[in-house]
Image (cartoon, rainbow, N blue to C red):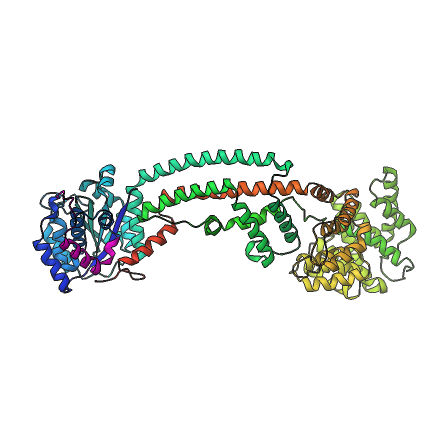
């Protein structure tokens, strides 16, 4: 596995070394030239062991170096010498000073020379080593040094065996380095040298800003620099890994599909795990019994436990485990590419990467069949078909009152007969023509009820507007004089303003008229206000006021209000399923949607209402016989419930596998540009062992 080491420090001048550091300096001056690259494979000497122990104690971050890994795996004299040289080289700034460090980087044996020395930067102009050394030494701000190191075999394979390759690498990422070190690119200054050492060719990179007030390097910045180099150097390696991963994924996908097809073929034989069938059925009933958000984090404890049980049963599927094992292989390969460490991955049940599976289980069970929440929208026309004639029956004894108005109101037998014909589903042409003639005659006499109806049944837009405007004026004129009927006309006026009949839509004005009517106990105005507060139509939703108005209308036997009030008691805010059932049952004989809701509640059961399949089918059959297609679908649902559960389980298995597969796809896209965030956090944590303080770099 290819590996890359990047270490970062900053150089501080004027600092006196400790006694050991003086010894290190003497060692540099007197030690045998390791740059001669001896091929000594003998055992480590006692002196080397002692010196390595002292160096590691003084510089514990050296345990992160590739040279240390090689030494621990094979403690030969050659590897010991390589490790000693590397530790001393990377801490030359501590042992000496800035000026000497620059000279050391440029002239050290093993440094590839570009003329008189090995120093280079982004310019093609010759570099004056003494001038650079003095500039770095006298710079009043921070100066950073980075070491980027490869194993010899990786450097040879990837072509990083000369200063030109390294120089181009740094030039490609100088923007990334400047950003990571918080230095404006225009003020960025850098120098580097390539050291072609025996086991680990590397570069030393010196970075600082021309403005001494600028620049700082955080743990995140270190990780960003490392990421930039690693993704560039190992680009082809990563491409190869993911090509192999794609091939394996496709093979697994084909295998998984074949195995899932086999499971499907076994459904009828009862091969599907009965424990899963039981748990899915249990979860389906539990989810149907609650309102609110159906997400794992919002569920009651007992329902979460059912979801957990299903999750653990799914994990026992061999196909899922195979996919996860492959996912782990790729994650480990990617992790080692950046950290040089083996990664222990948790069991699938404990892996937080796949927590979303629990919400997927919930969605699948909720959508096991499309159980509709669709109910009819009661328009104002729907309600008027009942209200006009029912009011006629309520007030049939009321005689026309004498007044000085040009308008009057009267539900005569002729008017009521004509209304019923026009509102019937299939009137003949002759019947319709005769009824319209009666209406027109009544309208010409000033009957405001007929004037309004002529607006409803006319086909010419201008005629419609004219009749509605006249009717509105008539209602407003008659309302204060109508005694017991005043609340009714207030209700009609409110509706016309609400829906823009004979006037512009004016919800505020409409609300005032409806409120007057409701206060006077008009059950239709109470119903409309209750529905408006329930649905948040024209006014902010207010379930308390909705309950107040709908209850008042329901107590006056308004079936629309009873239905809406029952629905209100199925909401989370006003949840009372027992009240809802009682209200639905009171109108179910004449309302197919009430019988539908009763069937649905008894089929799945809800709080306080036990599941009763026989009663559920009785209500659903009644609703379906009256043309309710959703009741028919629930009947079909019940008949095929076991089959649907089996299909849901198979779908869960397929989608679980797809989640693992898609995580691999996301990882391929992400790693082609940068180390993923999780690995970045790991890298940052490891960097702390190099002396990094939170938000900056440790000084020595």
Q: Would residue 24 be found to the left or right of residue 340 on screen?
A: left
The quarter of the rendered structure image containing the N terminus is top left
- Identify the image quadrant of residue 233: top left
Judge by depth and name the residue closer to the eye, 526 or 135: 135
Q: Of all residues shown, which one is farthest toward the left?
A: 30
On the image, the x and y values in percent for residue 295 come to 57, 53
Which residue is located at x 29 percent, y 54 percent?
222
Asked if residue 622 shows in the view, the reply is yes
On the image, the x and y values in percent for residue 74 come to 22, 46
- Identify the image quadrant of residue 508: bottom right
Region of the chain picked out in magenta, as a range: 38-63
Asked if residue 598 is among those painted magenta in the image, a careful observer would answer no
On the image, the x and y values in percent for residue 458 come to 79, 44
Q: Is residue 515 above or below residue 70?
A: below
Q: Would residue 549 be found to the left or right of residue 189 on screen?
A: right
On the image, the x and y values in percent for residue 642 come to 66, 42
Q: Would residue 350 be found to the left or right of residue 100 on screen?
A: right
- Identify the image quadrant of residue 238: top left
Name the dominant secondary structure of the magenta segment: helix
Asked if residue 51 is among those painted magenta in the image, a careful observer would answer yes
Which residue is located at x 50 percent, y 51 percent?
355
The quarter of the rendered structure image containing the C terminus is bottom left
Judge by depth and name the residue closer to the eye, 275 or 59: 275
Q: How many marks?
A: 0
Asked if residue 477 shows in the view, the reply is no
Q: Of all residues shown, which one is farthest toward the bottom?
A: 519
């Amino acid at each position: 596995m290819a590996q890359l080491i990047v270490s970062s420090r900053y150089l501080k001048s004027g600092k006196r070394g400790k006694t050991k550091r003086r010894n290190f300096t003497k060692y540099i001056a007197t030690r045998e030239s390791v740059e001669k690259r001896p091929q000594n494979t003998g055992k480590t000497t006692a002196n080397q062991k002692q010196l390595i122990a002292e160096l590691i104690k003084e510089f514990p971050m050296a345990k992160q170096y590739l040279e240390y890994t090689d030494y621990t795996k094979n403690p030969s004299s050659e590897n010991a010498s390589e490790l000693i040289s590397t530790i001393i080289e990377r801490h030359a700034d501590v042992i000496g000073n800035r000026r000497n460090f620059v000279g050391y980087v440029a002239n050290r044996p093993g440094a590839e020379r570009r003329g008189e020395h090995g120093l280079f930067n982004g310019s093609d102009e010759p570099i004056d080593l003494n001038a650079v050394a003095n500039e770095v030494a006298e710079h009043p701000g921070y100066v950073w040094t980075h070491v980027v190191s490869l194993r010899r075999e990786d450097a040879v394979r990837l072509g990083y065996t000369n200063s030109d390759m390294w120089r181009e690498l740094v030039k490609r990422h100088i923007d990334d380095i400047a950003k990571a070190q918080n230095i404006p690119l225009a003020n960025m200054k850098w120098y580097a040298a390539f050291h072609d050492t025996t086991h680990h060719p590397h570069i030393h990179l010196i970075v600082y800003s021309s403005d001494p007030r600028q620049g700082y390097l955080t743990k995140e910045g270190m990780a960003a620099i490392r990421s930039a180099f690693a993704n560039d150097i190992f680009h082809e390696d990563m491409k190869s890994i993911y090509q192999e991963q794609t091939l394996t994924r496709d093979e697994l996908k084909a295998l998984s599909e074949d195995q899932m097809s086999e499971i499907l073929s076994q459904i009828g034989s009862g091969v599907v795990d009965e424990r899963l069938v039981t748990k899915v059925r249990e979860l389906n009933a539990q989810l149907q019994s609650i309102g609110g958000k159906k997400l794992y984090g919002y569920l009651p404890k007992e329902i979460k436990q059912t979801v957990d049980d299903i999750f653990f049963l799914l994990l026992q599927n061999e196909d899922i485990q195979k996919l996860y094992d492959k996912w782990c292989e790729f994650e480990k390969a990617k992790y080692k590419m950046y950290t040089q460490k083996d990664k222990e991955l948790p069991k699938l049940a404990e892996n937080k990467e796949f927590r979303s599976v629990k919400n997927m289980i919930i969605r699948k069970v909720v959508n096991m069949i499309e159980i509709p929440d669709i109910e009819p929208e009661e328009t104002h026309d729907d309600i008027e078909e009942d209200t006009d004639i029912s009011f006629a029956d309520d007030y049939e004894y009321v005689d026309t009152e004498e007044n000085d108005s040009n308008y009057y109101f009267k539900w005569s037998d002729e008017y009521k007969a004509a209304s019923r014909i026009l509102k019937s589903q299939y009137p003949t042409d002759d019947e319709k023509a005769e009824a319209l003639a009666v209406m027109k005659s009544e309208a010409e006499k000033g009957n405001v009820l007929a004037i309004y109806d002529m607006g409803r049944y006319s086909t010419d837009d201008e005629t419609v507007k004219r009749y509605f405007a006249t009717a509105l004026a008539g209602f407003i004129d008659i309302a204060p004089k109508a005694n017991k009927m005043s609340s009714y006309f207030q209700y009609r006026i409110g509706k016309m303003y609400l829906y823009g009949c004979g006037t512009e839509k004016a919800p505020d004005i409409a609300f005032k008229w409806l409120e007057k009517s409701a206060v006077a106990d008009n059950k239709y105005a109470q119903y409309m206000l209750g529905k408006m507060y329930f649905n948040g139509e024209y006014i902010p939703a207010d379930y308390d006021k909705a309950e107040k108005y709908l209850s008042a209308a329901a107590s006056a036997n308004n079936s629309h209000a009873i239905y809406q009030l029952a629905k209100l008691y199925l909401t989370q805010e006003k949840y009372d399923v027992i009240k809802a059932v009682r209200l639905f049952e009171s109108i179910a004989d004449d309302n197919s949607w009430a019988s539908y809701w009763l069937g649905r509640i008894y089929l799945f059961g809800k709080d306080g209402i036990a599941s009763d399949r026989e009663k559920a089918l009785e209500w659903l059959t009644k609703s379906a016989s009256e043309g309710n297609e959703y009741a028919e679908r629930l009947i079909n649902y019940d008949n095929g419930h076991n089959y649907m559960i089996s299909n849901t389980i198979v779908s869960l298995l397929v989608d679980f596998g797809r989640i693992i597969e898609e995580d691999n796809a996301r990882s391929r896209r992400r790693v082609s540009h940068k180390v993923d965030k999780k690995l970045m956090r790991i890298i940052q944590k490891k960097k702390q062992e190099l002396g990094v303080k939170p938000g900056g770099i440790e000084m020595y």
